[in-house]
Amino acid sequence: MSGPLRPVRLRPSDLVRLGTAGLRARPVRALLAALGIAVGIATMVTVVGISASSQARLLRQLDALGTNLLRVSPGDDLFGGDPVKLPKGAAAAVLRIDGVRETGQTGDTKATVRRNDLISSQVSLGISVQATSLDLLGTLDGKVRSGTWLNAATERHPAVVLGSVAAERLGLTAPDAQVWIGDRWFTVIGILDRMPLAEEIERSALVGFPAAEEYLNFDGHPTTVYERSDDQSVEIVRDALARTVSPERPSDAKVSRPSDALKAKAAAAGAFTGLMLGLGAVALFVGAVGVANTMVVAVLERRKEIGLRRSLGATRAQVRTQFLVEALILSVAGGAFGVAGGALATFGYAGVNALPAVVPMWALGGALGTTLLIGALAGIYPAIRAARVPPSVALTAQ
């Protein structure tokens, strides 16, 4: 006497073949359902990739520029008196602090720079005219884009070096031009390159301290002192700067670290990431609904197939697994195309904007994991519904 009948166990390859059979039979519907998943995943991968690429550029700049630059500026007068001024010997005093390598200083002359003498002095274009020491460029690790920097001779004459933004606003691309500062012509002898750690210099017209005192009625008091120190001495120097610059009233000197602003900008590079990820999640949800709808319709259309398989010995678990695998394959296919599309979009954006292309591995892994979860959630109800269809009812369905 033979023993009880046992259902045939399906191998993983059998499950994949069964799962893809239904998708191959209705390719257009499967493609449209997978497209919703692909759009959502591509959006999320692109958002994360672009944000990571922007942050990578800022952090790369930070590594190149260093974090050992400190800036001293006048503090706020708590009693509302005359504006606080740094002493004339502030830079020399800072240079005597242990660990300080070099210093540079600038002073606001209150003058304006214009393209010619016919433009009103009220038009400043957002450019400040600053007196500068010769060691400023070295302290800031700046570079001259064209022309030359001030020297011991030109700092005493009406010569000016323009920051990169100031030159753009004045419409100048090369030196040897004339600009009107105060009540006389100054010769542009140089244009600086970008300075991410000193953006205020980018918007400045720089003249020598002696020339500013002689031609612009500058009082000689610096408004900003920059210093570079050894990396291991930065915090010690930072604590000593205010007391050194203004021993009697340390509150008259405000110390800041320009690299902190660049770090904050790197952190803010992903400020809209949450919003865009939310939009991607909405698209992903719509895609999941599309997959679920496709699977429900497939169950209704394939009732005879389900009944035939049940009558031939397929268990409810096997039917349920078949439709669940079909939903997973559909979701994973959409997710794979979405990951590829998001990565390509990130690389394209990075290439156009001269960014280092970065697509975090956690984003790729998370995207594929999300598609598996979506496939399981979208397919579990249709799979259960398919398994509950009685063979007799399924075979007689029209």
Image: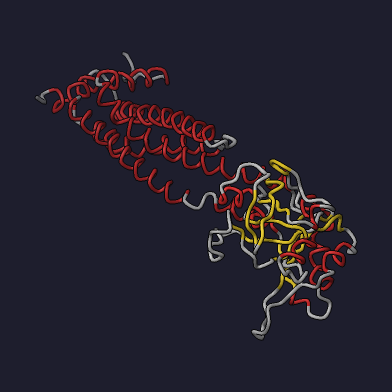
* Quadrant in which the C terminus is drawn: top left
Quadrant of the rendered structure where residue 60 is? top right
* Quadrant in which the N terminus is drawn: top left
Q: Position of residue 166 (x, y in %)?
A: 61, 52
User: How many circles with numbers are drawn on the protein?
Assistant: 0
Whether residue 270 sits left or right of residue 309 in the image: it is right
The vertical placement of 114 against 313, above or below, is below
**Which residue is at 20% across, 31% downward?**
297
Whether residue 47 sits left or right of residue 21 in the image: it is right
Question: What color scheme is it?
Answer: secondary structure
The vertical placement of 73 against 15, above or below, is below
Q: Position of residue 49 (x, y in %)?
A: 52, 39
Quadrant of the rendered structure where residue 238 is? bottom right
The vertical placement of 10 against 190, above or below, is above
**Which residue is at 38% across, 46% downward?**
279
Quadrant of the rendered structure where residue 17 is? top left
The answer to whether residue 140 of the structure is visible from this angle is yes
**Which residue is at 64% across, 42% downward?**
174
Q: Position of residue 92 (x, y in %)?
A: 87, 65
Whether residue 298 sits left or right of residue 272 in the image: it is left
The answer to whether residue 56 of the structure is visible from this angle is no
**Which residue is at 71% across, 60% downward?**
257
Q: Nearer the viewer, residue 345 or 42?
A: 345
Whether residue 82 sits left or right of residue 26 in the image: it is right
Q: Nearer the viewer, residue 324 or 275?
A: 275
Q: Nearer the viewer, residue 247 or 344?
A: 247
Q: Position of residue 48 (x, y in %)?
A: 50, 42
